[in-house]
Amino acid sequence: MAIQLAPIVGAEKSKVPFYIAGGALVVWAVFVSVGLGMRKPSFPGNASGERAVIAITVVLVLAAASMAVATSGTPASSAAAPAASTPTGTAVSTPAPAGAATQSTTSTGAPTTPASSPSPAGAGSSLKLAANPSGALSYNTKQLSAKAGKVTIAMTNMSPLEHNVTVAQGSTVVGATPTFRGGARTLTLNLKPGTYTFYCSVPGHRQAGMEGTLTVS
């Protein structure tokens, strides 16, 4: 019975059951040795009495040992770690040039994974772009594709150099992020079907290969 109760007692982490079991063992030991052993030289008298004394002693020893194990240990801390706060991005509106109905850039301050993100139906196209983090003058891709309408490009720049992403159709620039280093900026445009070019407008960067094609269908 003591062994079966050990898991339940251990969950409470109370020392009282151990004190009770240990005290019972001590009382029994004193009773057997002083109360019976010293007063009755013939104790335990016969084989049956001897087996009874051994059985009771074993039960009390097991109970004390079980309570010692069950009540030991440190309960797990229940304190919950405070949730980390997430900085809110700051949107900067800029006038929309010809061919672009809306244009905005958003500073998130946190890097994003350079990969395309599917958008819900009717919500436009969300694209991801990243500058080479080692400092090479290149993006992580030279081809982007989107559906006509609202197109959002989230650009991450963890390079030691400053970069931007500029979108143009022919010689007409339809939108661009600020030139920045560290974190990410988001460019949102309304684009008609056609072929556009995206590139970094920092002098010399486009010429070194930092450009690609955006196909809008």
Image (cartoon, rainbow, N blue to C red):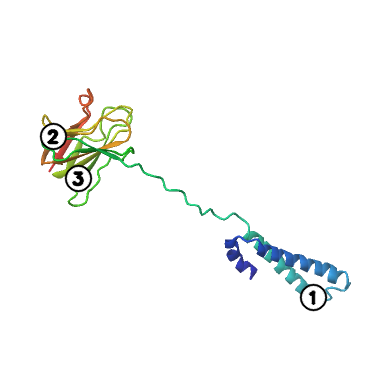
Q: Nearer the viewer, mark 1 or mark 2?
A: 2
Quadrant where the image shows the N terminus: bottom right
Quadrant in the rendering for residue 97: top left
What residue does disc 2 label? 97
Provide the secondary structure element on which disc 2 rests. loop
Provide the secondary structure element on which disc 1 rests. helix
Residue 163: x and y in percent read 26, 29
Residue depicted at x 79% and y 75%: 49
Amino acid type at circle 2 is Pro
Quadrant in the rendering for residue 166: top left
Q: Nearer the viewer, mark 3 or mark 2?
A: 2
Provide the secondary structure element on which disc 3 rests. strand
**Residue 125 got which mark?**
3
Q: Residues within 10 Å of mark 3 (few under 14, many from 20)?
A: many
Q: Residues within 10 Å of mark 1 (few under 14, many from 20)?
A: few
Q: Are marks 3 and 2 in contact (CB under 8 Å)?
A: no
**Towards the viewer: 46 or 140:** 140
Q: Is residue 62 visible?
A: no
Quadrant in the rendering for residue 57: bottom right
Q: Earlier in the sequence, mark 3 or mark 1?
A: 1
Q: CA distance from mark 3 to mark 1?
A: 89 Å
99 up-or-down from 36: above or below: above
Residue 13: x and y in percent read 60, 60
Quadrant where the image shows the C terminus: top left
**Residue 49 got which mark?**
1
Amino acid type at circle 1 is Gly
Q: Earlier in the sequence, mark 3 or mark 2?
A: 2
**Towards the viewer: 13 or 63:** 13
- Compared across the picture, whether 136 is left or right of 78 comes to left
Q: Earlier in the sequence, mark 1 or mark 2?
A: 1
